[in-house]
Image (tube, grey):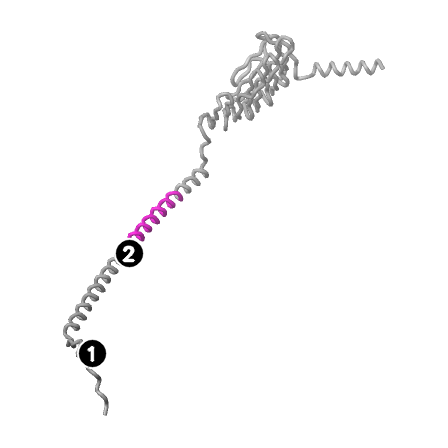
Amino acid sequence: MKRVIGLIICSVMCFAFSSDVQRKVIRYNGFDIECYVSLKKTNHFNKNKTYYWYKSGEIHQSLSTSGGLVLHKKYLKYYKGNQLVEQGTFSFGLKIGDWKTWYKNGKLKTNEAWVNGHRNGHFKAYDSLGNLIEKGNYKNNLKDGYWIDLVKKDTIYHKNDFEFKERPKNLVERLLRKRDSLEKVQIKADRKAKRKHDSINRVKLKLKRSLKKRNDSIKRVKDKLKRKEQKKLDSINRSKAPKKNFFKKLFNKPKKNK
Protein backbone atom coordinates (compact mmCIF):
# COMPACT_ATOMS: atom_id res chain seq x y z
CA MET A 1 0.00 0.00 0.00
CA LYS A 2 2.80 2.37 0.95
CA ARG A 3 4.52 1.49 -2.28
CA VAL A 4 1.40 2.42 -4.31
CA ILE A 5 1.03 5.74 -2.51
CA GLY A 6 4.68 6.48 -3.10
CA LEU A 7 4.30 5.78 -6.81
CA ILE A 8 1.28 8.08 -7.02
CA ILE A 9 3.13 10.92 -5.27
CA CYS A 10 6.14 10.46 -7.53
CA SER A 11 3.89 10.48 -10.61
CA VAL A 12 2.17 13.69 -9.51
CA MET A 13 5.48 15.38 -8.76
CA CYS A 14 6.96 14.28 -12.06
CA PHE A 15 3.88 15.57 -13.88
CA ALA A 16 4.07 18.89 -12.04
CA PHE A 17 7.72 19.37 -12.86
CA SER A 18 7.27 18.26 -16.47
CA SER A 19 4.24 20.52 -17.09
CA ASP A 20 4.62 23.31 -19.62
CA VAL A 21 2.33 25.59 -17.55
CA GLN A 22 3.21 27.26 -14.27
CA ARG A 23 0.85 28.85 -11.74
CA LYS A 24 1.57 32.39 -10.52
CA VAL A 25 -0.02 34.20 -7.58
CA ILE A 26 0.87 37.89 -7.35
CA ARG A 27 -0.32 41.11 -5.79
CA TYR A 28 -0.50 43.89 -8.36
CA ASN A 29 -1.92 47.42 -8.01
CA GLY A 30 -3.90 46.44 -4.91
CA PHE A 31 -5.40 43.31 -6.47
CA ASP A 32 -4.64 39.64 -5.98
CA ILE A 33 -4.07 37.81 -9.26
CA GLU A 34 -3.96 34.11 -9.94
CA CYS A 35 -2.76 33.22 -13.40
CA TYR A 36 -0.77 30.68 -15.39
CA VAL A 37 2.16 31.18 -17.73
CA SER A 38 3.47 29.04 -20.54
CA LEU A 39 7.02 27.84 -19.98
CA LYS A 40 7.40 27.34 -23.72
CA LYS A 41 9.07 30.22 -25.47
CA THR A 42 6.79 31.86 -28.01
CA ASN A 43 8.54 33.02 -31.17
CA HIS A 44 5.60 33.76 -33.42
CA PHE A 45 3.48 36.84 -32.73
CA ASN A 46 0.54 38.15 -34.71
CA LYS A 47 0.58 41.79 -35.80
CA ASN A 48 -1.89 44.27 -34.28
CA LYS A 49 -2.70 41.95 -31.38
CA THR A 50 -2.07 42.67 -27.70
CA TYR A 51 -0.09 40.03 -25.80
CA TYR A 52 -0.13 39.67 -22.01
CA TRP A 53 2.99 38.34 -20.31
CA TYR A 54 4.62 37.89 -16.92
CA LYS A 55 8.02 39.10 -15.71
CA SER A 56 9.54 40.05 -12.35
CA GLY A 57 6.32 39.50 -10.41
CA GLU A 58 4.25 41.78 -12.67
CA ILE A 59 1.89 41.38 -15.64
CA HIS A 60 2.65 43.43 -18.72
CA GLN A 61 1.05 43.88 -22.13
CA SER A 62 2.52 44.84 -25.48
CA LEU A 63 1.53 44.94 -29.14
CA SER A 64 2.77 42.11 -31.38
CA THR A 65 5.49 40.99 -28.98
CA SER A 66 6.30 39.69 -25.50
CA GLY A 67 9.08 40.47 -23.03
CA GLY A 68 8.54 37.47 -20.74
CA LEU A 69 6.45 34.36 -20.22
CA VAL A 70 3.10 34.69 -21.96
CA LEU A 71 -0.06 34.12 -19.94
CA HIS A 72 -1.84 30.86 -20.72
CA LYS A 73 -5.02 29.16 -19.49
CA LYS A 74 -7.08 30.51 -16.57
CA TYR A 75 -6.84 34.08 -15.25
CA LEU A 76 -8.46 35.32 -12.03
CA LYS A 77 -8.28 38.76 -10.43
CA TYR A 78 -9.65 39.55 -6.94
CA TYR A 79 -10.51 42.49 -4.73
CA LYS A 80 -9.45 42.22 -1.11
CA GLY A 81 -11.66 39.59 0.49
CA ASN A 82 -11.61 37.21 -2.48
CA GLN A 83 -14.33 39.05 -4.41
CA LEU A 84 -13.78 38.55 -8.15
CA VAL A 85 -12.80 41.57 -10.26
CA GLU A 86 -12.05 39.87 -13.57
CA GLN A 87 -12.12 36.37 -15.00
CA GLY A 88 -11.09 34.98 -18.35
CA THR A 89 -8.84 32.69 -20.34
CA PHE A 90 -5.58 33.20 -22.26
CA SER A 91 -4.13 31.22 -25.13
CA PHE A 92 -0.38 31.88 -25.31
CA GLY A 93 -0.76 35.54 -24.36
CA LEU A 94 -3.99 36.25 -26.24
CA LYS A 95 -7.45 36.61 -24.70
CA ILE A 96 -10.01 34.00 -25.77
CA GLY A 97 -13.55 33.03 -24.78
CA ASP A 98 -15.81 34.93 -22.35
CA TRP A 99 -14.25 37.63 -20.19
CA LYS A 100 -16.21 39.08 -17.28
CA THR A 101 -15.67 41.87 -14.77
CA TRP A 102 -17.50 42.64 -11.49
CA TYR A 103 -18.18 45.60 -9.18
CA LYS A 104 -17.05 45.47 -5.55
CA ASN A 105 -20.61 44.59 -4.51
CA GLY A 106 -20.44 41.43 -6.62
CA LYS A 107 -22.70 42.67 -9.43
CA LEU A 108 -21.61 41.82 -12.98
CA LYS A 109 -20.07 44.82 -14.74
CA THR A 110 -19.17 43.60 -18.26
CA ASN A 111 -19.39 40.42 -20.30
CA GLU A 112 -17.60 40.23 -23.63
CA ALA A 113 -16.38 37.59 -26.09
CA TRP A 114 -12.80 37.29 -27.35
CA VAL A 115 -11.42 35.23 -30.23
CA ASN A 116 -7.66 34.86 -30.67
CA GLY A 117 -6.82 38.21 -29.07
CA HIS A 118 -9.61 40.28 -30.65
CA ARG A 119 -13.05 41.16 -29.40
CA ASN A 120 -15.41 39.09 -31.51
CA GLY A 121 -19.03 38.57 -30.53
CA HIS A 122 -21.29 39.83 -27.79
CA PHE A 123 -20.70 42.69 -25.39
CA LYS A 124 -22.90 43.66 -22.45
CA ALA A 125 -22.41 46.32 -19.77
CA TYR A 126 -24.33 46.67 -16.49
CA ASP A 127 -24.61 49.29 -13.77
CA SER A 128 -23.75 48.60 -10.12
CA LEU A 129 -27.36 47.52 -9.49
CA GLY A 130 -27.21 44.85 -12.16
CA ASN A 131 -29.27 46.69 -14.80
CA LEU A 132 -28.24 46.28 -18.44
CA ILE A 133 -27.07 49.69 -19.74
CA GLU A 134 -25.40 48.86 -23.08
CA LYS A 135 -25.21 45.96 -25.49
CA GLY A 136 -23.80 45.23 -28.92
CA ASN A 137 -21.37 43.08 -30.88
CA TYR A 138 -17.72 43.27 -31.91
CA LYS A 139 -16.09 42.05 -35.11
CA ASN A 140 -12.29 41.97 -35.29
CA ASN A 141 -12.01 44.35 -32.34
CA LEU A 142 -14.39 46.90 -33.91
CA LYS A 143 -17.99 47.61 -32.96
CA ASP A 144 -20.26 45.94 -35.49
CA GLY A 145 -23.99 46.21 -36.13
CA TYR A 146 -26.52 47.79 -33.79
CA TRP A 147 -25.30 49.08 -30.42
CA ILE A 148 -28.01 50.04 -27.94
CA ASP A 149 -27.45 52.53 -25.13
CA LEU A 150 -30.32 51.89 -22.73
CA VAL A 151 -29.43 54.89 -20.55
CA LYS A 152 -29.47 57.44 -23.38
CA LYS A 153 -32.14 55.40 -25.18
CA ASP A 154 -30.12 55.65 -28.35
CA THR A 155 -29.26 53.12 -31.07
CA ILE A 156 -26.22 53.44 -33.35
CA TYR A 157 -25.28 51.19 -36.25
CA HIS A 158 -21.55 50.47 -36.60
CA LYS A 159 -19.81 49.20 -39.72
CA ASN A 160 -16.08 49.27 -40.51
CA ASP A 161 -15.37 51.78 -37.73
CA PHE A 162 -18.09 54.15 -38.98
CA GLU A 163 -21.28 55.13 -37.18
CA PHE A 164 -24.74 55.39 -38.75
CA LYS A 165 -28.19 56.17 -37.40
CA GLU A 166 -29.56 53.22 -39.39
CA ARG A 167 -28.12 50.23 -41.20
CA PRO A 168 -26.72 51.15 -44.65
CA LYS A 169 -28.25 49.37 -47.64
CA ASN A 170 -26.19 46.64 -49.33
CA LEU A 171 -25.86 46.31 -53.11
CA VAL A 172 -28.96 44.15 -53.55
CA GLU A 173 -31.05 46.42 -51.30
CA ARG A 174 -29.80 49.50 -53.17
CA LEU A 175 -30.74 47.93 -56.51
CA LEU A 176 -34.17 46.98 -55.16
CA ARG A 177 -34.55 50.45 -53.71
CA LYS A 178 -33.61 51.94 -57.13
CA ARG A 179 -36.19 49.71 -58.80
CA ASP A 180 -38.76 50.72 -56.23
CA SER A 181 -37.89 54.35 -56.90
CA LEU A 182 -38.37 53.86 -60.65
CA GLU A 183 -41.68 52.14 -59.98
CA LYS A 184 -42.76 55.08 -57.83
CA VAL A 185 -41.82 57.49 -60.66
CA GLN A 186 -43.82 55.37 -63.12
CA ILE A 187 -46.81 55.27 -60.77
CA LYS A 188 -46.59 59.05 -60.35
CA ALA A 189 -46.44 59.52 -64.14
CA ASP A 190 -49.42 57.19 -64.63
CA ARG A 191 -51.44 59.10 -62.05
CA LYS A 192 -50.56 62.40 -63.74
CA ALA A 193 -51.59 61.02 -67.16
CA LYS A 194 -54.87 59.72 -65.69
CA ARG A 195 -55.62 63.11 -64.11
CA LYS A 196 -54.91 64.78 -67.48
CA HIS A 197 -57.15 62.28 -69.30
CA ASP A 198 -59.94 62.75 -66.76
CA SER A 199 -59.61 66.52 -67.08
CA ILE A 200 -59.93 66.30 -70.89
CA ASN A 201 -62.98 64.05 -70.53
CA ARG A 202 -64.56 66.54 -68.12
CA VAL A 203 -63.94 69.39 -70.58
CA LYS A 204 -65.43 67.34 -73.44
CA LEU A 205 -68.47 66.45 -71.35
CA LYS A 206 -68.91 70.09 -70.37
CA LEU A 207 -68.71 71.19 -74.04
CA LYS A 208 -71.19 68.46 -75.01
CA ARG A 209 -73.65 69.59 -72.34
CA SER A 210 -73.18 73.22 -73.35
CA LEU A 211 -73.80 72.38 -77.03
CA LYS A 212 -76.92 70.35 -76.16
CA LYS A 213 -78.19 73.19 -74.02
CA ARG A 214 -77.58 75.62 -76.87
CA ASN A 215 -79.34 73.35 -79.41
CA ASP A 216 -82.29 72.90 -77.06
CA SER A 217 -82.50 76.66 -76.63
CA ILE A 218 -82.43 77.21 -80.42
CA LYS A 219 -85.13 74.55 -80.89
CA ARG A 220 -87.34 76.20 -78.28
CA VAL A 221 -86.95 79.59 -80.00
CA LYS A 222 -87.76 78.02 -83.38
CA ASP A 223 -90.85 76.26 -81.96
CA LYS A 224 -91.96 79.50 -80.38
CA LEU A 225 -91.53 81.41 -83.64
CA LYS A 226 -93.35 78.63 -85.53
CA ARG A 227 -96.28 78.76 -83.13
CA LYS A 228 -96.35 82.51 -83.37
CA GLU A 229 -96.31 82.36 -87.17
CA GLN A 230 -99.09 79.78 -87.18
CA LYS A 231 -101.15 81.89 -84.87
CA LYS A 232 -100.67 84.84 -87.15
CA LEU A 233 -101.75 82.83 -90.21
CA ASP A 234 -104.79 81.54 -88.36
CA SER A 235 -105.72 85.09 -87.47
CA ILE A 236 -105.37 86.21 -91.11
CA ASN A 237 -107.52 83.33 -92.33
CA ARG A 238 -110.23 84.13 -89.87
CA SER A 239 -110.25 87.73 -90.95
CA LYS A 240 -110.65 86.78 -94.65
CA ALA A 241 -113.65 84.45 -94.07
CA PRO A 242 -117.20 86.01 -94.92
CA LYS A 243 -119.18 87.08 -91.93
CA LYS A 244 -122.85 85.94 -91.57
CA ASN A 245 -125.65 87.96 -89.96
CA PHE A 246 -126.72 86.39 -86.73
CA PHE A 247 -130.47 86.85 -87.32
CA LYS A 248 -130.21 85.73 -90.88
CA LYS A 249 -128.42 82.64 -89.84
CA LEU A 250 -131.02 82.13 -87.12
CA PHE A 251 -134.11 82.36 -89.41
CA ASN A 252 -132.60 80.85 -92.44
CA LYS A 253 -134.34 77.51 -92.89
CA PRO A 254 -132.72 74.72 -94.68
CA LYS A 255 -134.24 73.89 -98.11
CA LYS A 256 -136.19 70.64 -98.55
CA ASN A 257 -135.13 68.21 -101.17
CA LYS A 258 -137.71 67.58 -103.91
Q: Where is residue 257 shown, x and y percent of the image? A: 23, 90
For label 2, the residue is 209
Secondary structure found at label 1: helix
Residue 250's place in the image compared with 22, above or below, is below
| Mark whose residue sits in front, 2 or 1 | 1
Q: Quadrant of residue 94?
A: top right
Q: Where is residue 221 shown, x and y percent of the image? A: 21, 61
Mark carried by residue 250 = 1
> Which residue occupies the extreme bottom position in the image?
258
Q: Quadrant of residue 7?
A: top right
Residue 160's place in the image compared with 100, above or below, is below
Which quadrant holds the C terminus? bottom left
Instruction: Tell me the kind of residue under disc 1.
Output: Leu
Compare residues 243 and 28 and report the one nearer the observer: 243
Q: Magenta region's main secondary structure?
A: helix
Which quadrant holds the N terminus? top right
Residue at x-position 64% and y-position 9%: 81
Q: Which residues are magenta?
A: 183-205
Instruction: Tell me the kind of residue under disc 2.
Output: Arg
Q: Is residue 162 left or right of residue 67?
A: left
Q: Quadrant of residue 176?
A: top left
Q: Could you tell me how far apart the alpha carbons at marks 2 and 1 are, in whole angstroms?
A: 61 Å
Q: Crowding near pointer 1: few (<14 within 10 Å), some, many (20+)?
A: few
Residue 82 appearing in the image: yes
Magenta-span inclusion, residue 9: no
Compare residues 48 and 209 and report the one nearer the observer: 209
Q: Crowding near pointer 2: few (<14 within 10 Å), some, many (20+)?
A: few
Q: Where is residue 157 shown, x and y percent of the image? A: 47, 28
Residue at x-position 70% and y-position 14%: 17
Secondary structure found at label 2: helix
